[in-house]
Amino acid sequence: MRALFLALFLLLPWSAAAGPLDALRPDIDTSAAQVILVWTPEGTETLATGPLEPGGRETRSSDRFLLASVTKPMVAAALLQLAGQGRLDLDAPAAAHLPPAVVAGMGGMRGVSTAHLLTMTSGLPDYLDDAFTEAWMRAPIGWTPERALAFVHGEPAEFAPGRGYDYSNTNYLLAQLILERLTGQPLDAALRSLVLAPAGATRSSLVGLRPPGPEDAAGLDRGRDMRWLYASPGMGDGGLVAPAADVAVVFRALFIERRLLPPAMLARMLADPLGEGYGMGIVLTDEPGLGRVFSHSGGDIGYSAHALAFPDVPAVAVILRGDEDADEDLLLDALDLVLGG
């Protein structure tokens, strides 16, 4: 009997390759797909829990999730690549690289530079409000940055460029249009060529370019799968779909190995112009005992994500979840387990 019990125990999915993250299982809500990943120089630990979709198979660590605003560091890095190549002056007027109709709709954008867009210091109002969300949910097909930006045409600026900070997704739709204009490529191809492929992220793409695949997690809202909403190509403020490993490899390349951007451009990305804790597409904080943290969080209907790089450790930690309840504290607990704390 004892031998039979031992044999059955060894067949359990977590026991054959139990790792430090398995201690988190009792604290995890398994009603939605979730992947936790922690990388250190000693290796990578992952924990996948929950069904990939209602009634479906168990989630695997290689499955993909919508990143939402964790896309923003990728877009910022792509434009910084162009700046490092001399193809973009970050401090010149952004309007020079934008469609005239967009510029006119945004009040002329006088004094707004690409740097202001990337650091959320442009003063431009956020298109992503209740009116946009209601329109998107009524008809999810056919959305473009230009159509979304029309929701703030004619609205006054929050403040003069460079004189304040306000997290506005409008900035990153405009950043997308600049990136596409300068590269002559759609956003998906531009991100792949400038950031994803050089970092080693091979399985990331924009949502909405094709139907969800067998490795794409459902996004649940009150138990309903909301993937039907993401029928238009994802945009620069939050449109990437990726596995946790791709997110980790980009954050490693940017902030740990520092091989993705020239030093001057990385310094620009990590500069905090107004002391608000935000650089160019990246949140800048400190964590007691861990040092500097370069991070971004994301959330959209049915999905949430956190990605953190700790250059002083060094370590990278990522959590992707198929509802809106990804827990950054759980991710820090995962890091603590891996570090043996």
Image (cartoon, helix red, strand yellow):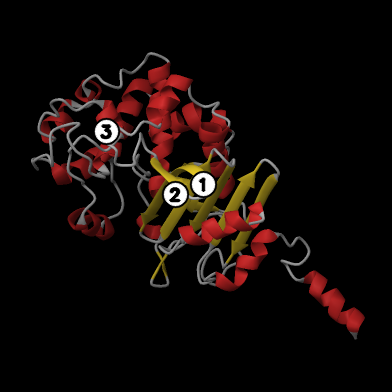
Inspect the image, locate mark 2, and give the three-letter code of the amino acid beneath it: Leu
Name the residue furthest front: 289
Name the residue furthest bottom: 1
Horizontally, residue 257 falls left or right of residue 182, namely right
Q: Is residue 161 above or below residue 166?
A: above
| Contact flag, marks 2 and 1 (Cβ < 8 Å) | yes
Q: Secondary structure at mark 3?
A: helix
Q: Secondary structure at mark 2?
A: loop
- Percent from the top left, x then y, of residue 7? 86, 75
- Crowd class of label 2 (few under 14; some 14 to 19; many from 20; radius 10 Å): many
* Residue drawn at point x = 51 percent, y = 42 percent: 309
Image quarter in which the N terminus is found: bottom right
Is there any visible trace of residue 239 in the rendered image?
no
Badge 1 or badge 3: first in the primary sequence: 3
- Percent from the top left, x then y, of residue 218? 48, 61
Is there any visible trace of residue 83 in the rendered image?
yes
Kindly report the distance in space between the C-alpha atoms of the residues bearing marks 1 and 3.
Answer: 24 Å
Inspect the image, locate mark 3, and give the three-letter code of the amino acid beneath it: Leu
Q: Secondary structure at mark 1?
A: strand
Q: Nearer the viewer, mark 3 or mark 2?
A: 3
- Percent from the top left, x then y, of residue 269? 39, 30
- Percent from the top left, x then y, of residue 230? 38, 53
What is the quadrant of residue 46 in the picture? bottom right
Which numbered dot is residue 117?
Answer: 3
What is the quadrant of residue 311 in the picture? top right
| Contact flag, marks 3 and 2 (Cβ < 8 Å) | no
- Numbered circles on residues, count: 3
Which numbered dot is residue 67?
Answer: 2
Which numbered dot is residue 242?
Answer: 1
* Residue drawn at point x = 63 percent, y = 57 percent: 341
